[in-house]
Image: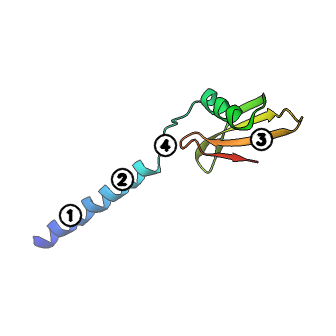
Amino acid sequence: MLSFFRTLLIIFSLMSLTLSGQIQAQPQAQTMTMRHAVNTVQKTYQGKLLKAYETRINQQTYYRVKLLTPSGRVISVLVNAHSGQMKKE
């Protein structure tokens, strides 16, 4: 009888770990809107907005923002929608 309860305990423990793993695997909610990302990029890099769109990379949401700089160069900046981290490409 004791072995039966141990088996049940192990099964419920494994089910609990599986469920918590599924919850953690869900994508994180966006904390930054595209408009906010565009404004932040424009303030940082000083340029006219050419294009902005949402993209998914490794199950995370990013915004790609393309600007025309005052010197005439086109730059592309990738913004993480969750953390706000920017990466000039």
* Residue at mark 1 to residue at mark 3: CA–CA distance: 53 Å
Circle 1 crowding by C-alpha within 10 Å: few under 14, some 14–19, many from 20? few
Dot 3 or dot 4, earlier in sequence: 4
Identity of the residue drawn at 25% across and 66% down: 10
Res 28 label: 4
Identity of the residue drawn at 21% across and 68% down: 7
Q: Secondary structure at mark 2?
A: helix
Res 55 label: none
Q: Quadrant of residue 15?
A: bottom left
* Residue at mark 2 to residue at mark 1: CA–CA distance: 16 Å
Dot 2 or dot 3, earlier in sequence: 2
Identity of the residue furthest to the right in this view: 72
Identity of the residue drawn at 67% across and 31% down: 38
User: Which residue lies under the disc numbered 2?
Assistant: 20
* Residue at mark 3 to residue at mark 4: CA–CA distance: 24 Å
In front: label 2 or label 4: 4
Q: Are marks 2 and 3 in contact (CB under 8 Å)?
A: no
The x and y percentages for residue 47 are: 78, 31
Circle 3 crowding by C-alpha within 10 Å: few under 14, some 14–19, many from 20? some
Dot 1 or dot 3, earlier in sequence: 1
Badge 2 amino acid: Ser
Q: How is the image coloured?
A: rainbow
Identity of the residue drawn at 88% across and 36% down: 71
In front: label 1 or label 4: 4
User: Which residue lies under the disc numbered 3?
Assistant: 76
Q: Quadrant of residue 43?
A: top right
Q: Are marks 3 and 4 in contact (CB under 8 Å)?
A: no
Q: Quadrant of residue 44?
A: top right
Q: Are marks 1 and 4 in contact (CB under 8 Å)?
A: no
Badge 1 amino acid: Leu
Dot 1 or dot 4, earlier in sequence: 1
The x and y percentages for residue 59 are: 58, 47
